[in-house]
Amino acid sequence: MYRSHREEEYAGEAHYGDSSTYVSPPTRARRRMIVVAATLVAVLVGGVAVDRIAADRAESRTAEAFQDGMGTAERPSVHVSGFPVLSQLAAGSLDHVGLTAHDIPADGTTRPLPVTKLTVGMDGLKTSGNADAAHADSVTATAFLSYADVSSALGVQVSQGDEPARVDATARLPLVGDVTVSAAVSAASGNRIAFTDVRAERGELLPPLKSLLDRALNEPIPLRNVPEGLHLRAVTTTEDGIDARFTGRSVTFHPDSSAGR
C-alpha cells in the first residue's frame, strides 16, 4: 500500500490535522517535578493549618487571661498577628496581639465609670504556663467612654461640646429647672479625667444646680478598671463619648489586675 512521504514522516505520532500541536507524554523527570511540587503544596497547606490551630489556641488562652483580669461578662476578641505563629510560640513571645473588650465594669469604686470599649495593642506578649497571666513588653490602649456611662457616673447629663476637647454638662432638678455648662476635658495624674474651665452656657446657675455641678465636675473622675501598668496620656471628645489613650511598658495582666478593683 502506498504512503505519501508526509504520512511516513508522522506515522505513529499523535496529531490533529495539518495545523495540530504534537504532544509527547511527560518525561520521568517532569513527572518527578510534578510530584515534588504537589508534595510541597500539601506540606505548606498542612503547615498553615497547623499554624492556624496554634494561633487559635494562643488567642483563646490570652482572651481567657484578660477576661479573668478585667471581669468582663463576655470574653474579649483577640487576634495574633504574624506568620508563622509556631515560631513565635517557640521563642516564647508573640510579636503583636490585638484585643478588644466591651463593657468592663468598675464595681466597688466611688463614682464607678465603666469602660464601654477597650482596644489594646500588645507587642512582645509572653504568656505563662497557665491561662491566668500575660506579660507584654509594650502596650497601647484606647478606652472609649460613652456619654451615657459618663453621665451615670457623674450624675449630670454629659454630651459633646461645641468646641474640641470640651463637653456640655446639664444639671436638672425638679421645681428648680436646669442649667448647662461647658467644661474642658483633659488627662490628670493617677489615670483620672479632669473637667476644668467651666463656663455657663444656658439657664440660671441657681445654688442647688451649682452644688450639683460642683459635685460632678470639681473632682477628676478616676478610671480604675483599666489593666494595671497603663498610664493615661490624653483624652479627646467625640460625637458619642470620650476616648482615653494609654501607654505602658512591661505590663502584666492577671486576675484582679485592673487598677482599683
Image: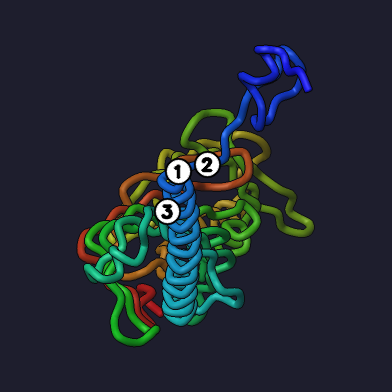
**Measuring 76% from the left and 18% from the top, which residue is drawn there?**
2
Which element carries disc 2, helix, strand or loop?
A: loop
In the image, 184 versus 16, the foreground residue is 16
Q: Residues within 10 Å of mark 1 (few under 14, many from 20)?
A: few
Quadrant housing the N terminus? top right
Which labelled disc corresponds to residue 159? none
Q: Residues within 10 Å of mark 2 (few under 14, many from 20)?
A: few
Q: Position of residue 161 (x, y in %)?
A: 58, 35
In the image, 145 versus 35, the foreground residue is 35
**Measuring 61% from the left and 62% from the top, which residue is drawn there?**
155
**Mark 3 — residue?**
36
Q: Position of residue 85 (x, y in %)?
A: 36, 62
**Mark 2 — residue?**
26
Check disc 2 and give the amino acid type.
Pro
Could you tell me how far apart the alpha carbons at marks 3 and 1 are, in whole angstroms?
10 Å
Marks 1 and 2 close (CB-CB < 8 Å): yes
Check disc 1 and give the amino acid type.
Arg
Mark 3 vs mark 1: in front = 1
**Mark 1 — residue?**
30
Mark 2 vs mark 3: in front = 2
Could you tell me how far apart the alpha carbons at marks 2 and 3 are, in whole angstroms?
15 Å
Can residue 218 be seen?
Answer: no
